[in-house]
Amino acid sequence: MATFRWFTLRLFWSALLLPPLAFFLLWILHEIFFKDIYFPDVFLVIVAALLLFPLVSFALTSLGRRRFDFLQERGKSLLLTERGDAAAATLPLLRRLFDSGLLAPRDQEKCQQALRRTYFPFYAGHLEHAHAREQLLAALREGVRAEEAYYALKSYVLSQPQLTLGVAGIAEELLDYKPGDQALANFFVRHFLENRSTHYRAEYFYANHLSHDGGLSEAILDLCLERILGHERKDDFAAWCCARAFQSKWGADPRVRRALFHFEEDYRLAQREDDLARAVAACARLLSPEEIARWRTEGPPVPPATLKEQAQKWYVSAREWVWQALTWLRRHRAAALAGAGVLTVLLLYLNWPSRPQEETPAPQPAAAEPQQYFSLQVSSVRERLRANRMVQSLQSSGLEVRLIEPQTPAGWFAIRVGRYPSQEKAQAAGDSLKTAGIIQEFLVRSEERQ
């Protein structure tokens, strides 16, 4: 989650600052340095984005470091003046800083370690708060004043009036740090035996008690042995139960003897050499050769795998493959990021929408001119001289005028105006000329185009 916040915060600010930066960069290049020169704007924007992300990350990390240094110094000064309540007020601000994503995960770990060193006395004195207990456990794991953290947590655990799973979890970590602390282990064993608890938390303390062959081993075996033998368990707690049962009144039970034989075989193949393996081997050496030969012939019982078990096996294999892939990517982080960047640029270049080529429209075939047109016959006269005067008068009005020669010597000269594609247009033009007073009367005549 910390890595997700760190990445999304930087991605948000990079996306917010990229448009003005890209506009300013392209404006400078196009208007000042490279006028009237083409270069790929998209590629420059991508390069600017790749350079902007680490710059934004550096700025945000620096801001987070300054904020942490200020809050840490503030809390340290308050602790030195014994103002614990005021120092406690800085802890929510520090947690909010860690949750904000300003600091990288690696920087957060370093800052939290420094914070645990600074606030250790405050955490040790306020173990009623869950955050203080978590910080002391982290200090115990990291070795920061580990002995003080151990005894402070141990006192807290032993003083609890009611044992909860959280308290049991703290006790487990304490026993992992000091497995030989039987006072703490016996306290939990007695509590769980009184409640006849057999859950996994209780089994941890039972196994620790059996490994030291404590005085409550018989009570633990009375409570748990039958259930373990019935389920044919193969974990460490079952092995400790069988090893201690072999040394007590259950030593003649064939189920215990057979379980010890199989435990010894498994540990020998795995080359296990801890206290449990040595205790199991010591018991297995007391088994008779006839029993060993019979059990080797029979082999360990292998129940058929159910569909659920097969599905779980496939699920575990898939998770293992994914984990190996993530581990490889984490080790080769720079190469993976570089490859992803090159692939992204290549995909953007190949899939970027190009400007469609302007298609020149094919020349339309010229429409066939009509073979017939219409004109206006405005007059018919016999004398040529009079016909010419009328033609000149109409031409002075800007009209297209034609003089049609007579077919016979005694014929008439026809004066026609205009050329119109249809009879309706010719009629409309004649009405307009008549209304304007240019002509008196007219007839619409059709003519063949020559």
Image: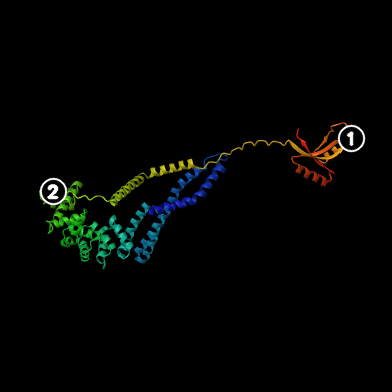
Question: Are there few (<14), some (14-19), or many (20+) residues within 10 Å of tag 1?
Answer: few
Q: How is the image coloured?
A: rainbow
- Left or right position of 218 against 41: left
Q: Nearer the viewer, mark 2 or mark 1?
A: 1
Q: Identity of the amino acid at label 1?
A: Glu
Check disc 2 and report its element: helix, strand or loop. Answer: helix
| Residue 397 or residue 186, whichever sits in front | 397
**Tags 2 and 1 in contact by the CB under 8 Å rule?**
no
| Residue 327 or residue 44, whichever sits in front | 327
From what the image shows, is residue 29 above or below residue 85? above
Check disc 1 and report its element: helix, strand or loop. Answer: loop
Quadrant occupied by the N terminus:
bottom left
Q: Which residue is mark 1?
A: 383
Q: Which residue is mark 2?
A: 294
Rendering quarter of residue 170:
bottom left
Question: Can residue 180 be seen?
Answer: no
- Left or right position of 228 against 103: left
Q: Position of residue 16 (x, y in %)?
A: 49, 52
Q: Residue at x 46, y 42 (%)?
A: 347
Q: Residue at x 32, y 62 (%)?
A: 132
| Residue 252 or residue 13, whichever sits in front | 252
